[in-house]
Image (spheres, rainbow, N blue to C red):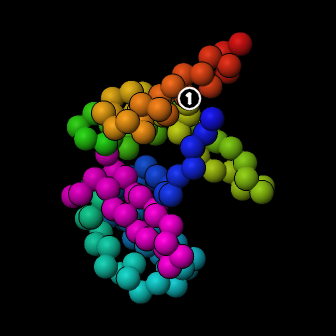
């Protein structure tokens, strides 16, 4: 059974230009001046930058996961889904499973069980 989450993870190219595009989009959506506190080098420097929306939802912008996964690795596992006629890139099940399997967090290990079952059904 899928679990409820309090955040959305975005795997991003950590380039300065891309971070500026992310900031522009966030300002357009949320009209929140605190977005200007995000520096163009933050995703590259810290690996994860968390923005909390005005209504308390977390958006995590991730440039790499430890030393094992960088944006370029994740990019290889993208598939496109359509939501309300908008194409959205998402991490495919195989790549997400690979990310979660290397984690020691108990919640990620629960996700591994769910993802393996989903993958098994997908292959039938």
**Residue occupying the point 50% across, 58% down:** 6
Q: Which quadrant is home to the N terminus?
A: top right
Q: Circle 1 is placed at which residue position?
A: 114
State whether residue 78 is above or below residue 28. above
Q: Position of residue 34 (x, y in %)?
A: 38, 82
Q: Is residue 47 magenta?
A: yes
Q: Is residue 3 above or below residue 76?
A: below
- Give the magenta-colored segment's residue range: 45-64
Query: Residue 109 or 75: which is nearer the viewer?
Result: 109
* Screen quadrant of the C terminus: top right
Residue 101 position within the rendered picture, expressed as x and y whole percent measured from the top left? 39, 27
Question: Is 40 included in the stretch rendered in magenta?
Answer: no
Q: Residue at x 56, y 34 (%)?
A: 92
- At a point 39% along the width and 78% down the height, the residue shown is 35
Q: Indicate the position of residue 114 as horizontal and vertical percent values.
A: 56, 29
Question: Which residue is located at x 28 percent, y 53 percent?
Answer: 47
Q: In the rendered view, does 85 fall on the left or right side of 16? A: right
Residue 58 seen in the current view: yes
Could you tell me which secondary element the residue under label 1 belongs to?
Answer: helix
């Amino acid at each position: 059974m899928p679990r409820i989450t309090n955040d959305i993870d975005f795997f991003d190219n950590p380039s300065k230009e891309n971070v500026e595009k992310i900031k522009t989009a966030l300002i357009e959506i949320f009209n929140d001046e605190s977005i200007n506190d995000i520096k163009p080098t933050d995703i590259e420097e810290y690996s994860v930058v968390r923005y909390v929306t005005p209504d308390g939802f977390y958006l995590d912008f991730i440039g790499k996961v430890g030393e094992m996964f960088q944006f370029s690795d994740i990019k290889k596992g993208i598939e496109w889904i359509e939501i309300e006629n908008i194409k959205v890139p998402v991490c495919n099940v195989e790549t997400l499973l690979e990310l979660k399997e290397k984690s020691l967090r108990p919640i990620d290990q629960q996700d591994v069980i769910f993802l393996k079952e989903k993958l098994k059904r997908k292959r039938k």
